[in-house]
Image (cartoon, rainbow, N blue to C red):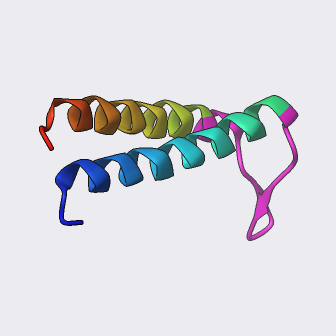
Amino acid sequence: MNSPRIGLRVAGAVFGIVGLGHLIRLLWQPKILVAGWPLPLWLNAVGFIFAGGLSLWMWKISGRISK
């Protein structure tokens, strides 16, 4: 159970879920207020690209590691 492959895949799955959350906000466009200020949608676009990229990277690296 100390396999780095499992850890990378779990991290990739978590980053993928976070990326999907950002994508859902971009598609549905709900209004979100933080301390009374509206949160702009472009932050979710950056978050989607960043989290999605990390997810793909983790899955790619996990495929290179031998069991």
Residue 37's image quarter? bottom right
For the N terminus, the image quarter is bottom left
Residue at the location (59% across, 40% down)?
43
Q: Residue 12 in magenta?
A: no
Depth check: give the residue in front, 6 or 26.
6
Depth check: give the residue in front, 50 or 41.
50
Q: Residue 31 in magenta?
A: yes
Residue at the location (47% across, 33% down)?
52
Residue 54's image quarter? top left
Q: Is residue 35 above or below residue 25?
A: below
**What span is colored magenta in the figure?**
28-44
Image location of residue 63, percent across then percent down: 24, 31
Residue at the location (14% across, 38% down)?
65
Callout count = 0
Would you say 9 lies left or right of 20 here? Answer: left
Would you say 58 lies left or right of 44 here? Answer: left
**Residue lying furthest bottom:** 35
Image location of residue 30, percent across then percent down: 87, 45
Image location of residue 21, percent across then percent down: 67, 45
Would you say 65 lies left or right of 7 here? Answer: left
Residue at the location (43% across, 36% down)?
50
Would you say 50 lies left or right of 31 here? Answer: left
For the C terminus, the image quarter is top left
**Residue lying furthest left:** 66
Image location of residue 8, percent across then percent down: 29, 49
